Amino acid sequence: MKARSIGGVLDMRALATLHRPSTRDEMVVVVTELASRGMPETSIAAATGLAIEQIRRILGDHQEEATP
């Protein structure tokens, strides 16, 4: 028996869903990190499963906190 076939085969989308951050604080960290790496909002939304409006809200809130 091969380890990769135990319990079935997971595709990348299933793995991403399985390891998706579960709290708002974790999601904020992920979204802001991806944005800081230059990832566009639409790609962040696709990667996280959040709506583009949620991504923009998180990034806007984060930017307001960083502004003195």
Image (cartoon, rainbow, N blue to C red):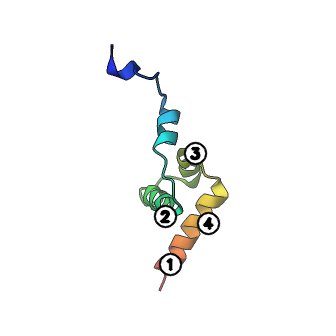
Which mark's residue is nearer the viewer, 2 or 1? 2
Mark 4 and mark 1 lie on one chain; the one further toward the N terminus is: 4
Q: Return the residue at label 2.
A: 25
Q: In the picture shown, does residue 59 fall above or below 67?
A: above
Mark 2 and mark 3 lie on one chain; the one further toward the N terminus is: 2
Q: In the picture shown, does residue 29 fall above or below 48?
A: below
Q: Classify mark 1: residues with Cα within 10 Å, few (<14), some (14-19) or many (20+).
A: few
* Residue 50 locus on image (x, y percent): 61, 52
Left/right placement of residue 10 relative to residue 46 reads left
Q: Are marks 2 and 4 in contact (CB under 8 Å)?
A: no
Q: Amino acid at mark 2?
A: Asp
Element carrying mark 3? helix
Q: Return the residue at label 1.
A: 65
Element carrying mark 1? helix
Q: Quadrant of the N terminus?
A: top left
Q: Residue at x 51, y 53 (%)?
A: 22
Q: Amino acid at mark 4?
A: Arg
Q: Give the label on residue 57, or none.
A: 4
Q: Amino acid at mark 1?
A: Glu
Q: Classify mark 3: residues with Cα within 10 Å, few (<14), some (14-19) or many (20+).
A: few
- Kindly report the distance in space between the C-alpha atoms of the residues bearing marks 2 and 3: 19 Å
Mark 3 and mark 1 lie on one chain; the one further toward the N terminus is: 3
- Which residue is at the front of the view, 1 or 44? 1
- Kindly report the distance in space between the C-alpha atoms of the residues bearing marks 2 and 4: 13 Å
Which mark's residue is nearer the viewer, 2 or 4? 2
Element carrying mark 2? helix
* Residue 49 locus on image (x, y percent): 59, 47
Q: Residue at x 40, y 19 (%)?
A: 5
- Kindly report the distance in space between the C-alpha atoms of the residues bearing marks 2 and 1: 14 Å
Mark 2 and mark 4 lie on one chain; the one further toward the N terminus is: 2
- Residue occupying the far top of the picture: 1
Q: Amino acid at mark 3?
A: Ala
